[in-house]
Image (cartoon, rainbow, N blue to C red):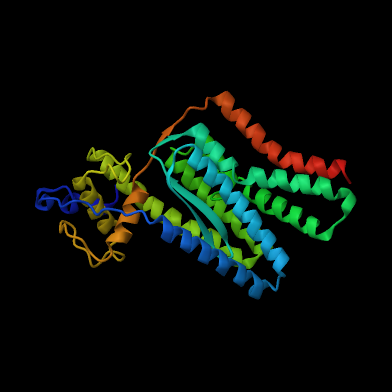
Amino acid sequence: MSESFNQEQNPSEEKFTSSFPPKPIVEEKSQNALRRSLISLAIYALMFYFLFDRNIVYIAAILLVLIIHEMGHFLFMKLFNYSNVKIFIIPLLGAFTSGKKQQVSQWQLSLIILAGPLPGIIIGCLLFWLNKDLKNETIEMLYSSFLVINLLNCLPFFPLDGGRLIETLFFKENYIIRLVFGIISIIVLLFLFAYLNPILLIVPVIIGLELYNENKHQKIREYLKHEKINYHVDYVNLPDKDYWLIRDCLIFSFPKKYNLLTPGKYEYAIVEPIVIQQINAVLQVNLNPDLNLFKRVLMVLFYIGIFVGPILLFLLNR
């Protein structure tokens, strides 16, 4: 454990064991989330239009690809009873879908990941086959958008869907391997995005910041495990006492970020919403490893087939 949790600063020490007030209640605001998504979608389109001098048809095609991709994730999360499922549009960078479920199946999570790029790749292949005789430039642009964006997203690097699939199948519960995988992903994406579009270099920078924060969070989990505090629980079922103790750990780990907060002083602060987000990042879901080695190998072969299928289609129809 880091020096942040030495004996002199132990948040579970008697000097910090005053009465614990109730943890803050998180209100779900689905309407606000929908409004933010629509506004972000509009900003995405405007930035593409003005920064890249693209026509309306091209921008509409990109947005269509993104929406179909994220709706795949969204629908499968709903199918597997995830709660608070939301789609976020990030101008210029893309989009992502989030949801909550404490008991997560390895099989279901793999399907949720594949449900994003697979429909777009199938649509792209169908449009390519349809256009082989028509030779329509608009259809060509559309199938190229579907195939390029979704196949790029299938590359085996985090946080792309391909990387998330490999992580889910083989080492989601192993922090060290995930850390190494993240570092390799940053290096590869730096070169890839520098070649494709320098604006995308912000993605590996964001991944680096996430890895830094995750390293801090992992140290907090190690401390919590030592203190027999359960962090494999969702926020709703997190005991009030554990909320405030994890909050103290965050204050010790991020002293500059929470310099206005005092460990052991259990009262709500203006930055409490940020604290809640950080605590949710520390908490972990329970992953049910319901795929044996044979099934995981089959899943990997299917994953490889996602790339092989479009390549064969192009070669056979040249």
Residue at 25% of width from left, 66% of height from top?
270
Of residues 154 and 86, the one drawn nearer to the viewer in this rendering: 86
Q: Residue at x 14, y 50 (%)?
A: 20
Q: Is residue 13 left or right of residue 221?
A: left
Between 120 and 282, the residue placed more toward the observer is 120
Q: Residue at x 44, y 58 (%)?
A: 33
Where residue 232 sits, quadrant-wise, is top left
Q: Nearer the viewer, residue 36 or 143?
A: 36
Q: Residue at x 25, y 57 (%)?
A: 252
- Judged left or right of residue 239, residue 48 is right
In the displayed structure, 318 sits above or below 271; it is above
Q: Is residue 64 above or below residue 288?
A: below
* Residue 208 to residue 7: above or below: below
Up-down relation of residue 225 to residue 9 (above or below): above
* Residue 260 lies in quadrant: bottom left
Total number of numbered discs in the rendering: 0
Q: Is residue 216 left or right of residue 260?
A: right
Provide residue 82's location: percent of width, then percent of height. 44, 41
Residue 56 in percent (x, y) is at 70, 68
Residue 170 visible in the shown view: no
Q: Position of residue 257 (x, y in %)?
A: 31, 65
Residue 290: in sight, yes or no?
yes
Residue 276's quadrant in the figure? Answer: bottom left
